[in-house]
Image: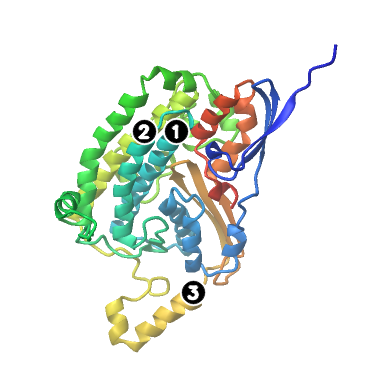
């Protein structure tokens, strides 16, 4: 009798559940996975090398395009590394704005993750609901930076500009009805802060809707409970961070353990799982969205009650005001010098990390005293998570692989940096 051999199969790189250009070579025994070998490099754009050939400010927009679902968070780690090397103080109002948009970005990320993860395992309705909420959050991005996704809003020493006093509104077109336009603009009559407050009031009800659809749904639980289990000890050994680590029961969050900006002044909890499976990681991210809303409300309250500068007054690193440029030739020359030649960092090295929606996102920067980094290394959370895929999927079915890739929340912009 002939020996039955395992066979190999390609999963991706065009598979809709691959979350980017991931190619997996699967070794299968029937439909049971014996080995999963991730092949990366199909999206490689040399972000680290490009950053070494551009001034520090010119590299800020490149950060947006790493994890293109958590844009401002990538910028945050980058500017924090620069500030660390310069010992540059950030105004308190700018710190609150950064925290506000970090949490808005966390919601953006988790909403896309939830919609796509549910879609991957067969639940389509959730995807439509989460994208409805993402539109409101993209409007916040657009109001403050002019761009809906790649904002380039953070700057060394603060943020590009203060929050606008007027929220942009929908305009009537020849294809729209005035009554519909008026309804769309109902919560856009005030400032951006008013709009964010309104969203933070509405959003917990939307999370309840998602949970009604999924949390006790027997099909959802059959697809996630007991799937991709990782023990607390193994999660640490594999280099897990963020919801992947907390889902395994490890209470580790940089916002609490190594506070940055004003997180130490704010009240929030760290949700943790018990079993370390796909279902626990789902529950952790759901609770993280509720905690983000709590943080957003605290930030909007403080920002409403306190004014002040939003970028450092150190003229070596912050651009002059536009009003000054129109009246003073020296300010205009300073502006052009800053955005062409840039500024120089002292010789040295620094590492700065933020609690990214996917885990610890870090920037390691080495300066030789020039106006661009000598070396830039990005610590992407998804890279370590993808490396565990073989171990997490062994013994599972092909359909479980889809759920495990979804629970990892990988985006190839940061993995193939």
Mark 3 nearby-residue class (10 Å; few <14, some 14–19, many ≥20):
many
Rendered position, 394 above or below 177: above
Q: Position of residue 154 (x, y in %)?
A: 39, 60
The residue to which callout 1 is attached is 119
Note whether 243 is above or below 52 in the view shown: above
Is tag 2's residue or tag 1's residue first in the polypeptide sequence?
A: 1
Question: Residue furthest toward the right?
Answer: 1
What residue is disc 3 on?
Answer: 342
Label located before the other in sequence (2 or 3): 2
Who comes first in sequence, dot 3 or dot 1? 1
Q: Secondary structure at mark 2?
A: helix
**Pointer 2 residue:** 126
Q: Is residue 368 visible?
A: yes
Instruction: Please name the residue shown 54% across and 33% down the image.
Output: 405
Mark 2 and 3 residues: CB-CB less than 8 Å, in contact?
no
Q: x and y percent of residue 210 in the render?
A: 33, 30
Q: At 59% across and 64% down in the image, what residue appears?
A: 50
Q: Is residue 177 left or right of residue 115?
A: left
* Residues at marks 3 and 1, CA–CA distance in whole angstroms: 45 Å
**Quadrant in the rendering for residue 7:** top right
Nearer to us: label 2 or label 3: 2
**Pointer 2 with pointer 1, Cβ within 8 A:** yes
Q: Residue 229 location, x and y as percent?
A: 54, 23
Dot 1, how many residues are within 10 Å of its Cα: few (below 14), some (14-19), or many (20+)? some
The residue at 41%/35% (across/down) is 114
């Amino acid at each position: 009798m002939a020996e039955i051999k395992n066979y190999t199969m390609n999963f991706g790189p065009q598979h809709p559940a691959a979350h980017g250009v991931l190619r997996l070579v699967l070794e299968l025994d029937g439909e049971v996975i014996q080995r999963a070998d991730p092949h990366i490099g199909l999206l490689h754009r040399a972000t680290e090398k490009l950053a070494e050939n551009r001034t520090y400010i010119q590299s800020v927009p490149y950060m947006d395009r790493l994890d293109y679902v958590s844009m401002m968070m990538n910028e945050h780690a980058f500017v924090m590394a620069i500030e660390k090397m310069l010992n540059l103080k950030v105004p308190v109002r700018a710190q609150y704005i950064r925290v506000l948009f970090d949490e808005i970005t966390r919601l953006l990320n988790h909403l896309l993750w939830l919609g796509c993860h549910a879609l991957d395992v067969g639940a389509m309705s959730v995807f439509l609901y989460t994208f409805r909420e993402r539109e409101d959050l993209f409007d916040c991005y657009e109001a403050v930076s002019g761009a809906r996704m790649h904002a380039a809003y953070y700057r060394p020493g603060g943020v590009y500009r203060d929050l606008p006093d007027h929220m942009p509104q929908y305009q009537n077109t020849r294809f729209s009805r005035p009554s519909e336009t008026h309804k769309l603009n109902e919560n856009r009559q005030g400032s951006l802060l008013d709009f964010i407050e309104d969203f933070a009031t509405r959003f917990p009800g939307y999370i309840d809707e998602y949970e009604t659809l999924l949390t006790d749904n027997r099909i959802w639980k059959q697809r996630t409970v007991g799937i991709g289990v990782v023990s607390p000890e193994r999660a640490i050994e594999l280099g897990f961070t963020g919801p992947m680590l907390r889902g395994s029961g490890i209470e580790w969050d940089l916002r609490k353990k190594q506070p940055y900006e004003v997180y130490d002044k704010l009240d929030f909890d760290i949700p943790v799982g018990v079993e370390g499976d796909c279902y626990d990681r789902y529950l952790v991210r759901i609770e993280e969205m509720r905690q983000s809303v709590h943080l957003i409300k605290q930030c909007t309250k403080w920002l409403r009650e306190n004014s002040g500068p939003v970028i450092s007054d150190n003229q070596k690193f912050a651009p002059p005001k536009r009003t000054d440029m129109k009246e003073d030739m020296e300010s205009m020359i300073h502006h052009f010098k800053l955005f062409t030649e840039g500024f120089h960092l002292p010789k040295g090295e620094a590492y700065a990390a933020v609690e990214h929606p996917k885990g610890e996102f870090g920037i390691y920067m080495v300066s030789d005293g020039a106006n661009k980094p000598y070396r830039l290394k990005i610590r992407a959370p998804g890279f370590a998570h993808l490396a565990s895929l073989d171990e997490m999927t062994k013994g599972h079915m092909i359909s479980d692989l889809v759920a495990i890739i979804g629970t990892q929340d990988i985006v190839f912009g940061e993995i193939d940096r």
